[in-house]
Image: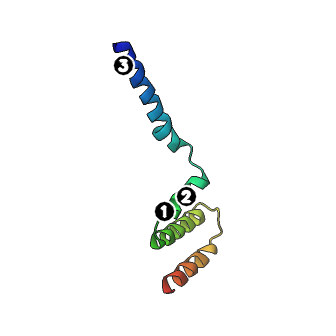
Amino acid sequence: MSVLLQMIMAMFAYLYYWNFVAREQQLTVGHVLDDAQQLNDAQQLELFGKLGNMLIGEGLLPMRALDSVHAVLRAANTS
């Protein structure tokens, strides 16, 4: 009986790992966008600003893009 119980526990541990733990390692742009769509409007704008700042800080976008990011955020906040 204890072997059967251990096999059942092992099966559930395996399923839990692959459905909840391992899934986090398979992060894609699609998953991030799906999560971003769950945010409210203000949170989406905050994410946009922080992502823009991060990309500029890492040198992936030119520094002159900072003015554009801030202009877009100002325009969004006034509408």
Check disc 3 and give the amino acid type. Answer: Leu
Marks 3 and 1: CB-CB under 8 Å?
A: no
Q: Amino acid at mark 2?
A: Asp
From what the image shows, is residue 54 above or below residue 74?
A: above
Q: Which residue is mark 3?
A: 5
Q: Position of residue 16 (x, y in %)?
A: 44, 35
SS at circle 1: loop
Q: Is residue 9 above or below residue 31?
A: above
Mark 3–mark 1 Cα distance, whole angstroms, equals: 40 Å
Looking at the image, which residue is at 45% across and 26% down?
Answer: 11
Q: Secondary structure at mark 3?
A: helix
> Tag 1: residue type?
Gln
Q: Gap in Å between the C-alphas at discs 3 and 2?
A: 38 Å
Residue 46 place in picture, x, y as percent: 48, 70
Image x and y of residue 27, in percent: 56, 48
Q: Please state which of residues 32 and 52 is positioned toward the viewer in this rendering.
A: 32
State the scheme by which the image is colored.
rainbow
Circles 1 and 2, Cβ within 8 Å, touching? The answer is yes
Mark number for residue 38? Answer: 1
Report the Cα–Cα distance between label 1 and label 2.
7 Å
User: Pointer 2: what residue?
Assistant: 34
Q: Residue furthest left?
A: 2
